Image: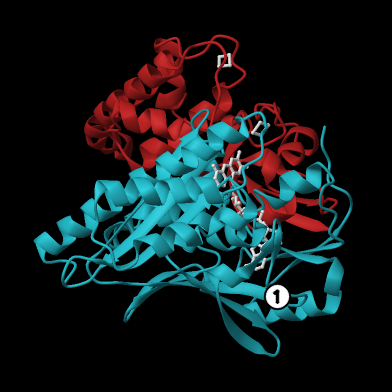
Chain colours: A red, B cyan
Amino acid sequence: MQVSINVNGTDYNAEVEPRHLLVRFLREDLRLTGTHWGCDTSNCGTCVVLLDGEPVKSCTVLAAMASGHSVRTVEGLEGPDGLDPVQQGFMEEHGLQCGFCTPGMMLTARALLDRNHDPSEEQIREAISGQLCRCTGYLNIVRAVRWAAEHQARAQTESPSQSETAGV
Amino acid sequence: MQVPASFDYRRAESVDDALALLERYGDGARVIAGGHSLLPMMKLRLARPEYLVDINDLTELDYLRLDGDRLRIGALTRHRKLLESEVVEHFFPIFTDAERVIADPPVRNRGTIGGSLCQADPSEDLSAVCSALAAEVVIRGRGGERVVPVHEFYRGPYETAVGVGEMLVEVRIPVRHRAGSAYEKVERKAGDWAVAAAGAALALAQDGRIEVAGIGLAAVGADAVHARAAEELLRGREPSEELFAEAGRRAGDDCEPVADNRGTAEYKRHLAAELTSRALRRAAARAAAGVEAGAGV
Ligand SMILES: Cc1cc2nc3c(=O)[nH]c(=O)nc-3n(C[C@H](O)[C@H](O)[C@H](O)COP(=O)(O)OP(=O)(O)OC[C@H]3O[C@@H](n4cnc5c(N)ncnc54)[C@H](O)[C@@H]3O)c2cc1C
Ligand code: FES
Ligand code: FES
């Protein structure tokens, strides 16, 4: 069947079998291997991507079900001005070791910060509770998301003057 | 890598369209809502539908509506919406208690109340919740609608009253005065299925006695989703610690848990009893607080 999925701002049209899973469409057809694939049983959360802006486990969504919708993967986090504050936060606060859980964690963090600019530690822990990390003990992931919240807020208060300069 | 067996996929554009597709494909067709019970089963080849009818575009089935003395919940309403709803928390805190511990945020972004009930897994938390609240479900086919009490909806594990060519469209919950409800669950780790869980819903009469009592259990056997014997004990009685302990014992005696990697049958029976009395205690306290605040009258 024909699907049309917007991934990181680009429309992709493809012929797929109805049983094709979104995680495989992303990794194998589009070669966007930043989306990881672990347990295959909707438990580990390493396959999390944003579907219309909200975290979902892409091993438990059919590509067919995502047709007509927009998907954001870790490859779509970086903006024209450089790394997303969430990516910087993971770097600054040492939010990863092996990196296997990291793409899903960062996308969940992005979705959380889009809705809540100043999440508490408890809210961050709740948001990432569907995703396993075998390395960090979660503490540095929480710190990384807090780092992003704080720096994002700072960037936003500074940005009006920046855009004025850009307009000149 | 787990891959489902081949199937044909159709995306329904309206409820009528979905029903026409279900009727056309008959026995081999299955509705797919959130897909978070069905797809894992298909990946394990425990389910092999020939046709999937995707109802995710049917936003007309995604609603929470207070309508006179009942709350109407569309079948496609996601766990997340139930968790975040203030109306649900105000009238039915048992839902909010349960939703906080159902799976995890990404699963709750997809899973629906219709899928939870139609899955008819005796471990499904919303089945216990809807049982405690004595919900009714609305089943629609091409010939029209029928309203079925949730206690008659389950025909056994993984079997419901939804027939070939039909689908669940709505869940209705009666709003009661001087009422309170609560859900208690023990899980091995955050987001896991229950080792055992119990939900209780009480409504008090003017004189403070229990007028309506509902108890639903999860993960302790298909027949225990509705804990009848414990409910009967409570009706017409004055709420008390002893009464709640006795109701818990009855719920524990009446259920039929099986041993698995989540615990022994004996442990689960103990949990069913203890969690029932805890849920009753909190439900009664919430009902009393509501009466005091004047909200429940
Ligand atoms: C990792 C994980 C953890 C989970 N933990 C819990 C938990 O702790 N507690 C809990 O209660 N649940 C848990 N679940 C299950 C979750 O709540 C599911 O989302 C839910 O059981 C099914 O909802 P769904 O919309 O995804 O249904 P689907 O998977 O789409 O469908 C399930 C069944 O219902 C049928 N169906 C769906 N909608 C309709 C309809 N409107 N009319 C007729 N038939 C219909 C389908 O044909 C299928 O047979 C968990 C799931 C996962 C993946
Ligand atoms: S691979 Fe999807 S949750 Fe583990
Ligand atoms: S960094 Fe290794 S699993 Fe999280």
Left or right, B84 with respect to B198, comes to left
Residue for point 39% across, 19% down: A144
Residue for point 84% across, 74% down: B26
Q: Position of residue A97 (x, y in %)?
A: 55, 9
Queried on whether the Cβ of the residue with tag 1 lies below 8 angstroms from ligand 1, the answer reads no
Instruction: Name, please, the residue furthest toward the bottom.
Output: B143
In this view, A74 is above or below A102: below
Q: Quadrant of residue B178?
A: bottom left
Q: Position of residue B128 (x, y in %)?
A: 50, 55
Q: Chain of mark 1?
A: B
In this view, A43 is above or below B7: above
Question: Where does label 1 land, which residue?
Answer: B18
In this view, B43 is above or below B187: below
Residue for point 31% across, 56% down: B89
Residue in the foreground of this view, choosing between B173 and B56:
B173
Q: Quadrant of ligand 3?
A: top right
Quadrant containing the C terminus of chain B is bottom left
